[in-house]
Image (cartoon, grey):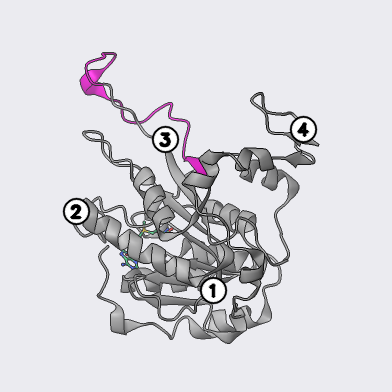
Amino acid sequence: MTQTSSFGTSKRESHDSSVFYQRSLYSELFQSELPSKEISQIEVPSPQDWDVNEIYQASSTHMHKVPNNSVALAFTSPPYNVGKEYDEDMGLEEYLNLIRDVGKEIYRTLVPGGRYVINIANLGRKPYIPLHSLFWELHMDIGFLPMGEIIWQKGKGASGSCAWGSWKSAKAPRLRDLHEYLLVFAKQSFSRPDKGESDIERDEFMSATLSIWEIAPESAKRVGHPAPFPIALAERVIRLYSYVGDVVLDPFSGSGTTCVAAKKTGRYYVGYDISQDYCTLSRERLLKTEPDSGMPEHGEALANLNHLTKSNHSSSRNGHG
Ligand SMILES: C[S@@+](CC[C@H](N)C(=O)[O-])C[C@H]1O[C@@H](n2cnc3c(N)ncnc32)[C@H](O)[C@@H]1O
C-alpha cells in the first residue's frame, strides 16, 4: 500500500491517504462528513413520489415543489448580474444573498452524497471580481463539502479581441479569459452512500476526471437565450456525477440545457426559471429531446404529458435575476 508523501506517488492502487487527512490542516478547516449511521436514517423520497420532469416558472429561492433530500445532482449557471436582459442591477451583497438563498434550497433538496455543480465566470478587470472564490466561501458556510474545481476551457484563443490599449506594453496588459469554472460541492458525504448504474464510458471518464475540460461554447443565437451553456458540458457533468434514473435539478434553468441533457441521459429533471419565455423555450426543447437509450418509464410518460401544462405562476415575479 502506498502513502501520500511529500514526493507524491506514482501508484493509485491501494493508496492510503488517511495520514494526510488526519493533519491539522484538514481537521481545523473543514466540516466533516455525516457518519454513515446518521445518513442511513435520512428518508429519501423516490422520483415516483413527487412531480419530476417539470419546468417551473418561479424563483429558485423557494423551490416548494421539490421535497427535502430528493435530488441527486444540481447543475446550474446562475445569472452573473452583468447586464443580460434577465439581470437586475444588484450590488455584490444583494447578489450573493440571492446565490446564498438558492444554495440553501439546493442543500435542503439534495440527497445525502448529492452534488451541486456551479458554472461561474469571474468578472471585470478594474477591479477583477473573483466570483468563484466568493462562491466557494459562501457555499462552504452553508455546509457544503468542497469536492473540486474544473476549469472549463472554452477555446484556444489564437484570435479574438486584443488589449489594444496596451499592445505589447507593460502599462496595463489585460488578460483575456478563455475559461470559466465549475465548482463541485457535495452534501454530507463525498461519496454516494447508495448504489446505482453509471453510464460513463472509459475514455469519457478519463477525460472528465481531469481538471481541465475543453468544450466549445454554445451559440446564444442558435439556442435563443443570452447565456446558454453547451449540452455537452451538462451531459458530462450528469454522467460523471449521477446515476441513471437520478433526479437532476437546475435552479436557473434558462433555455433548459441541463434538463435536456438529463432527459437525453435517462435521468429525471426539474428546472426553475423566473422567465416565462425561457420556461416555454425549455419545454419546447425538451419535447424535441429523445433519451439516448431507454428512460425510466415514469419519467418518459410525465415528460410528455405534464411539462407543457404546469407552471408555478404564483411566485413567478419574486426573482432577482
Ligand atoms: C445564465 S442563465 C442560465 C442559462 C442556462 N444554463 C442555459 O443553458 O440556458 C441564468 C438564468 O437564471 C434566470 N433567473 C434569474 N433569477 C432567477 C431566480 N431568482 N430564480 C430562477 N431563475 C432565475 C434567468 O432568467 C436566466 O435564464
Q: Which mark is residue 178?
A: 3
Asked if one can make out residue 289 in the rendered structure from this viewpoint, the answer is no
- The answer to whether residue 171 is magenta is yes
What residue is disc 1 on? 69
Q: Is residue 155 left or right of residue 137?
A: right
Q: Secondary structure at mark 2?
A: loop
4 or 1: tag closer to the N-terminus = 4
Task: Using the numbered discs, state the Cα–Cα distance from disc 4 to disc 2 in whole angstroms.
Answer: 48 Å
Category of crowding for the residue at label 2, using alpha-carbon neighbours closer than 10 angstroms: few (below 14), some (14–19), many (at least 20): few
Ligand 1 near label 4 (Cβ, under 8 Å)? Answer: no
Q: Amino acid at mark 4?
A: Lys
Category of crowding for the residue at label 1, using alpha-carbon neighbours closer than 10 angstroms: few (below 14), some (14–19), many (at least 20): many
Nearer to the camera, 245 or 27 = 27
What residue is disc 2 on? 91
4 or 3: tag closer to the N-terminus = 4
Answer whether labels 1 and 2 touch (C-beta < 8 Å). Answer: no
Residue at image location 30% in from the left, 62% down from the top: 98
Magenta: main secondary structure equals: loop
Q: Nearer the viewer, mark 2 or mark 3?
A: 2
Residue at image location 27% in from the left, 69% down from the top: 319
Task: Using the numbered discs, state the Cα–Cα distance from disc 1 to disc 2 in whole angstroms.
Answer: 32 Å
Q: Secondary structure at mark 4?
A: loop
Q: Is residue 309 above or below residue 200?
A: below
Residue furthest out toward the top: 169
